[in-house]
Amino acid sequence: MTNKEEPKKEVVNANGVPLFKASYNKQDVQLDNEIVYEFGGPIGVCAMMTGFPALMYYFWVSLEYHQGTLYYPESFTKEGLSNFFWNEYYGKIVEGALPNLTAIKIYMGYALFSFILAWIMPGPIVEGLAIPSLKGKKLKYQCNGLSSWYTVLATSAVLHVTGIFRLTQIIDNFGPIMSVAIIWGFTMTTLVCISGYVQGTNHRMSGNFFYDYFMGGPLNPRIGPVDLKMWAEIRLPWVVLFYCSLSCLLKQYELDGQVTAPAVFMVLAHFLYVNACQKGEECIPTSWDIFYEKDGFMLIFWNMAGVPFTYCYASIYLMKYQLTTGTAITHSLPYTAALFTALLLAYWVFDTGNSQKNRFRMEQNGSFFVRKTFPQLPWGHIKNPSYIKTEHGNLLLTSGWWGIVRKPHYTADLIMAISWGLITGFGSFLPYFYFCFFVVVLVHRVTRDMERCAKKYGKDWERYCERVPYIFVPYVF
Ligand code: NDP
């Protein structure tokens, strides 16, 4: 069904999109309050909350002491297992990854700096969706990510060039910084959780302490004008990830006087990601994470520690390989060129896919405006889009990438993820960890989201699935 077939009574914007998201209805309230155990319930989330940090350390030891090879006990006897745990695992963490003052200054210094920037820098103010638990109130979000990002870039360049803070120190202190991030992830989750209880802002609580700690209590915790969830989603993880890769590249340059194409590739890949988050920040207030997900361990820990310190293995592997063997990893020109091309094309789909849908949602919300941040890629905003109007009131976009598959931005994101592994060759699993993990995350996210949408839109969702039958790749899946 296209917009031409829709009745013309409703209020529409200049692009022909009706303002449907301007309010909320009973069904939104019901879905917003519904408690369903996800992620395997309390047992599953406890396993994740202990397993993630343990796995991060295991991978760190593999990279730091075993050139990226996954190490395992020499024997599965009591002695072998004890040696593996106490000497190889725990012993190495104590030796090289305990938090130190330098690491605290680097990580917490940046966290504080980015928070201050989020508070004071200029940027457009954008309204989020009507929040059912706040009786339809629309919160305002100060989107100053871009001015903050440029300030961080300029500040770091000055610090590095003047020698006040050499960016290579990040990678020199990677283990201790990761530990600080892990501790901060737990600390911030606890503080947000306590603030939810104290302020009485906890929402959709299951009553199980561990599950609620994982999923979070408050929906929109704030300090002053800073929305903590939005700050944690884009100001810290991707920026720290970018600086980890840049630090590896600079280290390579210090060692060798030159940089390799794979190291440049990783810096470009992470630059594109972080820049996309900042330049399109105004699209985030209408997203699922902001509107629906609460601020708990899942979002906080993963953003504070998980993303920056596990998605960077490709860059670190490239650097460690060169440090231990004396030879840098490079590939043939066609292989390298193919990967650069794949990265840039996938980025284009990722950027415009997110932008097409989010701008369409902003149009329905009445919060859309044209923002000329760099780069604005062709096809980022669809003129006169086609859509399915649901009984609920919301519209489901069926134009652009969204007319081809139901999750075009996920497919593009996955292609970028695998390219980060492929640029390192095939010497270690670790650069592919992000891709493997991401497949699991996105498949789970799709399943969760489709179930939610099927409930919310009923027959209209079926109509939408008939209109756009494939999820990731046309005619395949
Ligand atoms: P989506 O962008 O897929 O948002 C899902 C919601 O969008 C649905 O619940 C529905 O909301 C709405 N929606 C779905 N289809 C349509 C449509 N055709 N038209 C209009 N609205 C629609 O969610 P994510 O937040 O998961 O993904 C955003 C980006 O973040 C992606 O690019 C993803 O790859 C990336 N991401 C990256 C991660 C990482 O670690 N690298 C982790 C997670 C995400 P409603 O009910 O309001 O209609």
Image (cartoon, rainbow, N blue to C red):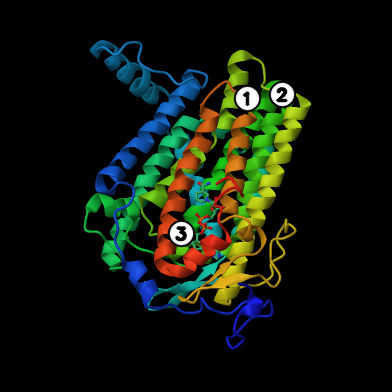
User: Which residue is painted at 23% across and 13% down in the image?
Assistant: 78
Q: CA distance from mark 1 to mark 3?
A: 34 Å
Answer yes or no: disc 3 within 8 Å of ligand 1.
yes
Residue 223's x, y, as percent?
43, 64
Give the number of the disc on residue 352: none
Q: What residue type is disc 1 on?
A: Gly
> What SS does tag 3 mark?
helix
Q: Is residue 425 left or right of 47 when viewed as pictured? A: right
Q: Do the residues under discs 2 and 1 have CB atoms within 8 angstroms?
A: yes
Residue nearest the viewer, comparing 194 with 441: 441
N-term-proximal mark, 3 vs 2: 3
Mark 3, Cα crowd under 10 Å, few <14 / some 14-19 / many 20+, is some
User: Which residue is painted at 61% across and 41% down in the image?
Assistant: 415
Q: Is residue 178 left or right of 252 when viewed as pictured? A: left
Q: CA distance from mark 2 to mark 1?
A: 8 Å
| Residue 159, visible in the rendered structure | no
Task: Quadrant for residue 366, please give it.
Answer: bottom right
263 w.r.t. 12: above or below: above
Mark 2, Cα crowd under 10 Å, few <14 / some 14-19 / many 20+, is some
Give the number of the disc on residue 331: 2
User: Which residue is painted at 57% across and 29% down in the image?
Assistant: 316
Q: Which residue does the numbered mark 1 point to in the structure image?
A: 425
Q: Which residue does the numbered mark 3 point to in the structure image?
A: 289
